[in-house]
Amino acid sequence: MIKRLAFVAGFGVGFVVGSASGRKSYESLRETAINTWNDPKVQDKVSEGTDWVKAEVPVVGGKLADTAQKAAGNVSAKAQDGASAVKDKAQGGAASVKAKVGSKSDSDLPKPATTEKDVDMDAAEPAPTKDDMKK
């Protein structure tokens, strides 16, 4: 039904915009649309549709609320499961690191580089020359 209405509306707009007779065809189309809208059969259908929507809104709203609550419960449960799994992995990783580090004393750890002599400052390749830059 909505597709038909969209087609008719699009056809009408295209007709008015593309029409060579201009204002006369616009007025004719406008008059036809007003007469169609004011037709008692059309107004009966509009009234039926409005009444149906008013009757169905509480039902649909209740279904949406129930579905939203279920979805929220599922998301909450999944988030709690994921959080506990991450917590367990983190605790296991921390215990593993403590076990590895606990077996070494501070004297076994490497001394950090603090001077230029301690750090390898030599270039991996020689710096480019002027001839290299011209290429």
Image (cartoon, helix red, strand yellow):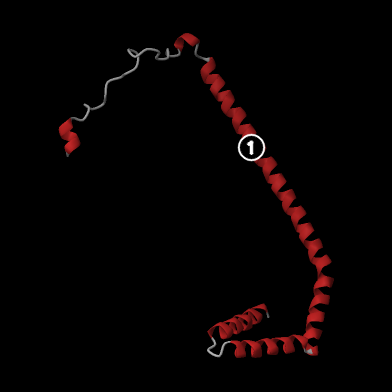
Query: Quadrant of the image for the C terminus?
Result: top left
Identify which residue is drawn at 82% across, 80% down: 47
Report whether 7 appears left or right of 117. Answer: right
Q: Identify whether 120 is placed above or below 62.
A: above
Please identify the residue farthest to the top as the structure is shown: 107
- Amino acid residing under circle 1: Ala
Q: Quick check: 75 above or below 52? A: above
Residue at the spot x=42%, y=14% of the render?
112
Location of residue 94 in the rendering, given as x and y in whole percent from the top left corner: 58, 25
Residue reaching furthest to the front:
23
User: Residue beneath label 1, please?
Assistant: 85
Kindly indicate the quadrant of the structure image that contains residue 44: bottom right
Q: Position of residue 88 (x, y in %)?
A: 63, 32
Residue 17 pos. (x, y %) = 56, 82
Picture residue at 60% right of the left edge, 30% below the top: 90
Name the side, left or right, on which 65 lies relative to 24: right
